[in-house]
Image (cartoon, rainbow, N blue to C red):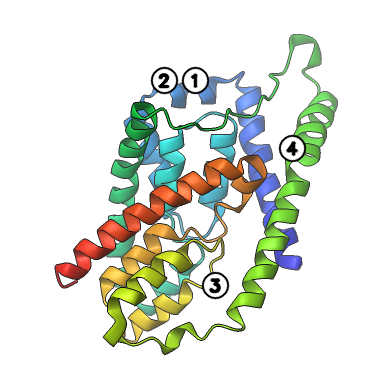
Amino acid sequence: FLESISISLLVMLMMIIVDLINVRSKGKLQSILKESKKWKQYIIGSLLGTTPGCVGSFAGVSLYMHGIISYGTIAGLMIATSGDEAFVMLAMFPKTAIILFAILFILGVFSGKLIDYLVLKFNIPISDDCKTEQLHKDEKSYKHYLKEHIWHHIIKEHVWKIFLWTFGALLVIEFSTNYLNLESLTNDYIWIVLLLSVLIGIIPDSGPHLIFVSLFAQGLIPFSILLSSSIVQDGHGLLPMLSFSVKDTISIKSFNVIIGLIIGSIMLLMGF
């Protein structure tokens, strides 16, 4: 419950910061990133994703919800992110962790470009951005901003949904992980472990991925399994997206699962 509140408050803070910058700049942030063309967006998105913790992901979701970055950029960001596990990996195997983050960053950039191409090529439906108001000339008061933007839009339309989705997801995760002994799998079933790393990566939480972090640190699984899990999982990063668009959340995860399986399988076949 407390974790749900803390995540919701952090998301609200990031949403307010992004919204305030966009509004006070009269949409200049939005136009700059939109007009910068996609490569700059992909690089910025992947940089946000590789930031340890979920703050970069939350910021990316806020940017996407405001229509500032593209669908491919947010999908690439989620590939690049390692969530809170980044701190654990840096503590347990720092050199390998940095290599992993670099690979995820590169994958995030190029995957974002590829995903945007596929969305356009096959006309894959995605959600419209939130319709936020700009500050009008006669409404440049903080009272108006607090009432219309923060209270009516961010809090009444988004934060309560974010809290409910977060609380519900964490409740299910807590219940399921208590009854699963996932670490009993051995290297005799390495392809099953690869598949599990991808499937468990779908869970919108940082905890389950730590199983594969620990197994890798103990030398029980190869780097390819850690990489595939890292590609698919995004910590709590994608939870705020559920309150905005379940459809986009599912499609982003689907892209990441496919990429995670392909890259993980190639790396495993190559002996990594």
Residue 88 location, x and y as percent?
Answer: 46, 74
In three-dimensional space, the C-alpha distance between marks 1 and 2, rounded to whole angstroms, equals: 6 Å
| Residue under the image location 58 percent in, 78 percent down | 177
Disc 4 is placed on an element classified as helix
Asked whether disc 1 touches disc 2, contact meaning CB atoms under 8 Å apart, the reply is: yes
Count numbered badges in the picture. 4
In the picture of the structure, the residue carrying the numbered disc 2 is 35
- Residues 263 and 31: in front is 263
Dividing the picture into quadrants, the one containing residue 112 is: top left
Q: Please name the amino acid that badge 3 sits on.
A: Gly
Q: Please name the amino acid that badge 4 sits on.
A: Ile
Instruction: Tell me the quarter of the image containing the C terminus.
Output: bottom left
Q: Is residue 93 above or below residue 235?
A: below
Disc 3 is placed on an element classified as loop
Disc 2 is placed on an element classified as helix
Among the two numbered marks 4 and 2 on one chain, the one whose residue lies closer to the N terminus: 2
| Residue under the image location 48 percent in, 45 percent down | 251
- Residues 258 and 49: in front is 258
Would you call the spot at circle 1 few (<14 residues within 10 Å), some (14-19), or many (20 or more)?
Answer: some
In three-dimensional space, the C-alpha distance between marks 4 and 2, rounded to whole angstroms, equals: 26 Å
